[in-house]
Image: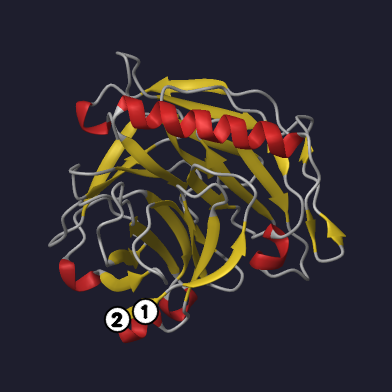
Amino acid sequence: MNSKLILSLCLLGFLSQSWIDGNTKVQGNRSTKNVEEDSLFLAGLPQGKLANPLLEEVSGLVASQRYPNRLYVHTDSGGEAAVFVLDTLGNELGRLDLSGLKNRDWEDIAIGPGPNGSSYIYIAEIGDNEAKHEEIYLYRFAEQELLQAIPSTAIDQVRLQFPGGPKDAETLLADPISGALFLVSKREPKNALYQVPATAFEKGSATLEKVHEFDFTSSVAGDISKDGSQILIKTYLAVFYWKRTHKQSLVEALQAPYIRLPYIPEPQGEAIGFNFWGDAYFTLSEKRNGILPTLYRYPKK
């Protein structure tokens, strides 16, 4: 993504969010005034810099659900068709090459239930800056103990379409409770939440269903905590947070007011994820203006 486009998106996000913070929305009979709150988490603490040139455009990050000290990241358009494995200080542990795939524009990564309820890694090839791709893709494979190449026979994929035509998106959410998958669009003044039909992987293709509309723009990443009780969506300028009760579906939780969490501005921050325990979240930026990507950790107070 070029610098002029990033600046335009940031300006749009700033203007939109400034208006939102000073106004109350009403949906039906319910007020949805969102609260700016920084008392839940502390400010970001730098953990380490990523010096590997292959990791200069990280666009997705998620913590393992099996190994507490393991983070999975990937790069976006034209990058390696691989998931890189870091520890929680940003040190490289290895990589998972995804055999038979190309990285057209991978934009986010998530972990959630797969077949038989086991832990699966999901890759979202959903970036589309010019809204020209009629089809986007999700890939999944079982989370492995060994850090080695994933054969093509172990990778499932599904072909997806947005209703109404192509859209750019950079956010994937995997619900650990229901197993449902969701995408968040990026470029509209009000980004939308789309659900992946439950039978999509079984059938091999599906049309997404729009299930909610947010009051912000420029969504670039998201995550759900391992227990399903906390949700994050990140824009270039802000981090939004929802607390979910055990009675709520993911959509119901996201329809409630959000809280803005602390965020240290990054050159081009497009990755966010909770840690293994859900008591902190990480952010990571792409390299811009000679600034190496730095992994930040935001712990709970």
User: Percent position (x, y) of residue 264?
Assistant: 57, 22
Residue 64 shows in the view: yes
In the rendered view, does 61 fall on the left or right side of 160? right
Q: Is residue 202 above or below residue 216?
A: below
Q: Residue lying furthest top in this view?
A: 290
Q: Amino acid at mark 1?
A: Ala
Comparing labels 2 and 1, the label whose residue is closer to the camera? 1
Residue located beneath label 2 in the image: 204
Residue 71 shows in the view: no
Q: Are marks 2 and 1 in contact (CB under 8 Å)?
A: no
Of 92 and 110, which appears nearest the observer? Answer: 110
User: Percent position (x, y) of residue 254?
Assistant: 68, 58
Q: Quadrant of residue 193?
A: bottom right
Residue appearing at x 78%, y 71% in the figure: 247
Of 237 and 199, which appears nearest the observer? Answer: 237
Q: Amino acid at mark 2?
A: Gly
Q: Which scheme is used to colour this image of the protein?
A: secondary structure
Q: Is residue 48 above or below residue 229?
A: above
Label 1 element class: strand
Of 198 and 9, which appears nearest the observer? Answer: 9
Q: Is residue 293 above or below residue 151?
A: above
In the rendered view, does 197 fall on the left or right side of 55? right
Residue appearing at x 34%, y 57% in the figure: 123
Q: Is residue 103 above or below residue 154?
A: above
User: Percent position (x, y) of residue 34?
Assistant: 77, 44
User: Percent position (x, y) of residue 106?
Assistant: 29, 50
Residue appearing at x 44%, y 73% in the figure: 208
Residue appearing at x 12%, y 62% in the figure: 100
**Quarter of the image where the N terminus is located:** top left
- Crowdedness near tag 2: few (<14), some (14–19) or many (≥20) residues, C-alpha within 10 Å: few
Report the disc number at residue 206: 1
